[in-house]
């Protein structure tokens, strides 16, 4: 057998040879070679070059997509289709500690119905806050169809701040849609039910006592919260209200809600009755509800609402008497209702009609002003003439559902569910311009800022219901398929298929990325769910454990790479609250926190204070640790929760035996001095270039300076111990000094790489 060292050498030589061969094959492969090898066409390459975002570059648009049955929101970029975040909304989300720390549990508790936790949601329609009809990038809203709820997300930190429960519905679908200055968030009911809570009414009394409605949630922009006391609803007939949209510009102050099953059919297959699907699609038309919400709000302010379940409701009788509620027939089992960017026209698509119907706001107003009504519905609501309200009708194809608008005047896009196509058409002249096939069965579609007053065009995403054969098979449940389409040219071009495996995303909204201004850190000690100072916050050096009876409260901090305190001793049965403040200022230095087996988890971003709470109901030893790989010594970011049994007597610990000698101390100090030389050379490079022109580097330098300041403190403690020839503690403090040096070096090298990649220039100093 050959000696080990020789064997190692020959292995190395062989490895080098193999690598050399592969290396030259890579170097020789041209674009043509790759196209051939992977079977790519010119068209594929064109599509790829339109979506590819090189490393380090960013997307032009940010999408907020409903997460469907996941109860979350999915955030991704366009054109890359890279997923950036899942925002926990109606459902616990472990990474963000959502539903596992006390602050977020309170947000989720806002969504309890009749005291019951509801830990899932059927999210349908996200809506961005608007100023003068344009997205302002401040807030996001989304509804839960199954359990009639609405959530508010703040786009400064992409966190859910509030969940409100609709007090009078049992399901809702026509939300969230905002008015042009986000005065109100609109939410319409779906399946009619008695409005008073827990009231039993037999289905035989459907027409008389079941009701629908539209709710206008008052949004307090300054507080960033919905104000339920200033919100109101309008009672509507038991037609299944579906989608809504707010008027804008000329039609500001009005809102539009369509419906299906205005037949008011009640099924019952088990009793031999034809099913809902037959009875609910029997008539040729359903009703578009036209509502003057501005006047409705005034009527509520004048005290004309009645209270149902403590909530302001304007009755149908009042709405009719005051002239704020009208109906217009719309063909047949409609789905989407979408106001044009200028607010002049309203597009309605009929699932079972091949047309879209474009209504004219001006024509609607003319009839209302003239008091010219065709008839009344069974509840006495005035019905306008469909013919006299229509601007045009355009035949698009089978199963039209939803419409979005382009930046080009008069151009709209409508999804065709049955045809599996997107139609581009001109709503001013009423003609079809182009069609593209998608895969498969499209629901909503979305253009960039496509439901605002100023759509940005360029891209369209088809939110498809079925993927069937588009992706590698993963069992009977397939992912959903978002398809990116280039709409900037005469012919639409399909660019990319993105599988979404988190639920059925019904709708999505896309905003210009430059409009969003999310923060990097919180003001130290912030409760991110209330945006207020957290009472559990402490600064470095103020950490403490406070006991009151059997309640133990920890006031701690986290910073690379230790948790203070590192030991928490409690008695079995104690109620323990751990408050932790992240003292970091550096970008992306999040720490996590968990305690073994107590089902708690917190994500603590820089500046945030979070608390977790549990009953220490079992004696024993429970490690706690940081759950984010936050630095080289992340694994050492640990501690112990000691839960002592009843009647436990303290054992007196013997003196700790010293293991380190002066030789260990000298060795560590030498390492530190060498490390300092590396740091000095990095600092030398950074200060020799124009680093102050690069804000990310400036904040890295701040962070590194911070770490070096801490290194100094550790060094001072080391010197004190060394003076007393306490080589044990002197060596340990020398090690702590080195830890801070390593962190500073890590940050310094990151800054250096950034400067090199971004072409920093010598300043000649
Ligand atoms: S709905 Cu699902 S495709 Cu809830 Cu807006 Cu039309
Ligand atoms: Cu902090 Cu790992």
Image: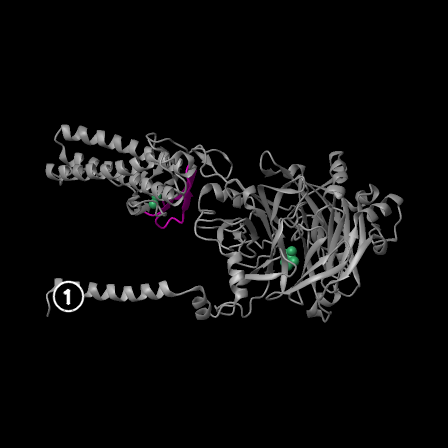
Residue appearing at x 50%, y 67% in the figure: 471
249 or 682, which lies in front?
682
Q: Quadrant of residue 685?
A: top left
Instruction: Please provide percent x and percent y for residue 232.
Output: 70, 41
Residue appearing at x 14%, y 32% in the figure: 726
The answer to whether any part of residue 62 appears in the image is: yes
Label 1: element kind: helix
Residue 613 belongs to magenta span: yes
Ligand 1 quarter of the rendering: bottom right
Residue 611 belongs to magenta span: yes
Q: Residue furthest front?
A: 764
Q: Quadrant of residue 5?
A: bottom left
Indicate left or right for 2 with 614 as reference: left
434 or 663, which lies in front?
434
Instruction: Please provide percent x and percent y for residue 500.
Output: 52, 59
**What crowding class fits label 1: few (fewer than 14 Cα within 10 Å), some (14-19), or many (20 or more)?**
few
Q: Quadrant of residue 459?
A: bottom right
**Residue occupied by mark 1:** 7
144 or 442, which lies in front?
442
Instruction: Please provide percent x and percent y for residue 582.
Output: 39, 37
Magenta segment: 592-619
- In the depicted structure, whether residue 553 falls above or below residue 53: above
- In the depicted structure, whether residue 375 falls above or below residue 604: below
Indicate left or right for 500 with 312 as reference: left
């Amino acid at each position: 057998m050959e000696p080990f060292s020789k064997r190692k050498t020959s292995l190395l030589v062989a490895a080098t040879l193999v690598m050399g061969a592969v290396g030259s094959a890579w170097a020789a492969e041209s674009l043509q070679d790759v196209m051939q090898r992977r079977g790519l066409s010119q068209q594929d390459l064109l599509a790829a070059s339109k979506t590819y975002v090189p490393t380090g570059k960013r997307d032009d648009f940010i999408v907020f997509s409903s997460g469907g049955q996941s109860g979350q929101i999915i955030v991704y970029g366009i054109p890359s289709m890279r997923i950036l975040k899942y925002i926990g909304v109606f459902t616990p989300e472990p990474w963000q500690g959502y539903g596992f720390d006390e602050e977020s549990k309170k947000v989720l508790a806002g969504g309890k119905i009749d005291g019951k936790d509801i830990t899932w949601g059927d999210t349908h329609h996200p809506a961005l806050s608007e100023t003068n009809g344009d997205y302002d990038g401040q807030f996001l809203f989304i509804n839960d169809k199954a359990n009639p709820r609405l959530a508010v997300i703040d786009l400064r930190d992409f966190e859910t701040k509030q969940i409100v429960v609709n007090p009078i519905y049992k399901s809702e679908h026509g939300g969230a849609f905002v008015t042009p200055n986000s005065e109100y968030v609109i939410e319409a009911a779906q399946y009619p039910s008695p409005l008073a809570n827990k009231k039993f009414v037999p289905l035989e009394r459907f027409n008389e006592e079941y009701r629908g409605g539209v709710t206008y949630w008052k949004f307090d922009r300054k507080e960033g919260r919905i104000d339920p006391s200033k919100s109101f609803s309008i009672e509507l007939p038991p037609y299944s209200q579906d989608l809504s949209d707010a008027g804008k510009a000329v039609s500001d102050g009005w809102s539009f809600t369509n419906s299906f099953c205005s037949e008011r059919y009640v099924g019952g297959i088990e009793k031999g009755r034809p099913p809902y699907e037959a009875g609910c699609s029997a008539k040729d038309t359903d009703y578009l509800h036209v509502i003057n919400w501005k006047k409705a709000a005034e009527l509520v302010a004048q005290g004309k609402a009645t209270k149902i379940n403590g909530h302001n409701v304007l009755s149908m009788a009042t709405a009719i008497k005051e002239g704020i509620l009208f109906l217009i027939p719309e063909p047949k089992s409609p789905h989407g209702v979408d106001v044009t960017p200028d607010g002049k026209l309203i597009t309605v698509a009929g699932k079972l009609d091949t047309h879209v119907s474009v209504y004219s706001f001006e024509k609607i107003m003319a009839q209302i002003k003239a008091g010219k009504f065709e008839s009344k519905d069974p509840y006495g609501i005035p019905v306008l003439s469909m013919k006299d309200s229509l601007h045009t009708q355009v035949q698009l194809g089978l199963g039209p559902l939803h419409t979005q608008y382009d930046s080009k005047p008069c151009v709209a896009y409508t999804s065709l569910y049955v045809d599996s196509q997107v139609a581009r058409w001109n709503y001013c002249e009423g003609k079809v311009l182009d069609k593209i096939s998608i895969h498969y069965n499209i629901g909503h579609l979305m253009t960039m800022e496509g439901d605002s007053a100023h759509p940005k065009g360029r891209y369209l995403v088809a939110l498809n219901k079925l993927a069937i054969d588009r992706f590698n098979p993963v069992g009977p449940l397939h992912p959903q398929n978002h398809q990116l389409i280039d709409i900037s040219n005469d012919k639409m071009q399909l660019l990319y298929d993105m599988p979404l495996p988190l639920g059925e995303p019904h709708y999505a909204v896309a905003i210009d990325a430059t409009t969003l201004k999310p923060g990097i850190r919180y003001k130290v000690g912030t409760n991110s769910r209330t945006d207020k100072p957290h009472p559990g916050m402490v600064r470095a050096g103020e950490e403490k454990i406070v006991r009151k009876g059997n309640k133990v409260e920890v006031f701690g901090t986290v910073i690379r790479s230790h948790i203070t305190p590192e030991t928490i001793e409690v008695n079995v049965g104690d109620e323990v609250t751990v408050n932790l403040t992240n003292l970091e200022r550096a970008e992306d230095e999040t720490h996590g926190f968990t305690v073994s087996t107590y089902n708690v988890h917190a994500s603590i971003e820089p500046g945030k204070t979070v608390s977790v709470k549990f009953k220490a109901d079992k004696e024993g030893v429970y490690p706690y640790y940081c759950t984010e790989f936050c630095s080289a010594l992340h694994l050492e970011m640990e501690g112990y929760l000691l839960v002592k049994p009843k009647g436990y007597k303290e054992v007196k610990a013997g003196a700790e035996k010293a293991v380190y000698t002066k030789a260990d101390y000298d060795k560590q100090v030498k390492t530190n001095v060498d490390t300092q030389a590396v740091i000095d050379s990095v600092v030398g490079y950074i200060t020799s270039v124009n680093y102050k022109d690069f804000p990310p580097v400036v904040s890295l330098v701040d962070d590194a300076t911070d770490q070096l300041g801490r290194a100094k403190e550790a060094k001072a403690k080391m010197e004190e111990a060394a003076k007393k020839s306490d080589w044990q503690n002197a060596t340990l403090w020398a090690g702590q000094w080195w830890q801070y040096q390593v962190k500073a070096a890590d940050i310094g090298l990151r800054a250096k790489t950034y400067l090199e990649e971004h072409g920093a220039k010598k300043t000649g100093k």
